[in-house]
Amino acid sequence: MKKVFVVVLVVLGLSLAACAGRNFETTHVSELKKGVQDKATVTEWFGKPYSIVSPLIDNKDGCVESWNYTYVTGGFYGAGAEQKSLTILFDKDGKVCGHQMSQTQ
């Protein structure tokens, strides 16, 4: 009976609130400039990326790597849901080549 109760609590908890990715600070997004910041600065500002894509193929701007920061959280049936995503592109020298940020609440 005790095991059933624990399972019910876990399932109920997962259905009430879900989270994916890692939360990250967005304070420095507006400071990202092409050719200025390097990977060390980006890591200092936003932390470790959730995922990295390398190499990028046929990027028109010459970007060779993509760092992706993603955080999604939701409450009971989506109430209070938040989603934010930041993609930062890097050139062959490890400098910012471009970025895109989206956020919904």
Image (cartoon, grey):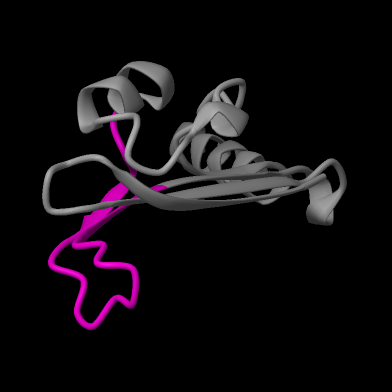
Q: Nearer the viewer, residue 30 or 54?
A: 30
Is most of the magenta stretch helix, strand or loop?
loop
Q: Position of residue 97 (x, y in %)?
A: 34, 51
Question: Is residue 53 located in the magenta-colored stretch of the structure?
Answer: yes
Residue 104 visible to the viewer: yes
Residue 88 visible to the viewer: no
Q: Quadrant of the C terminus?
A: top right
Q: Nearer the viewer, residue 95 or 2?
A: 95
Residue at x 33%, y 29% (from the top left corner): 37
Q: What residue occupies the far right of the structure in this picture?
A: 79
Residue at x 77%, y 46% (from the top left corner): 81
Left or right of 11 on screen, residue 22: left
Q: Position of residue 83 (x, y in %)?
A: 67, 48
Q: Position of residue 70 (x, y in %)?
A: 49, 47
Question: Quadrant of residue 59 in the image?
Answer: bottom left
Left or right of 51 on screen, residue 27: right
Residue at x 61%, y 21% (from the top left corner): 27
Q: What residue occupies the far bottom of the structure in this picture?
A: 58
Segment tinted magenta in the rendering: 48-68
Left or right of 37 on screen, residue 80: right
Left or right of 25 on screen, residue 46: left
Relative to 21, is 46 above or below?
above
Q: Position of residue 71 (x, y in %)?
A: 54, 43
Question: Quadrant of residue 73 in the image?
Answer: top right
Q: What residue occupies the far front of the structure in this picture?
A: 35
Residue at x 21%, y 53% (from the top left corner): 91
Relative to 38, is 18 above or below?
below
Q: Nearer the viewer, residue 52 or 6?
A: 52
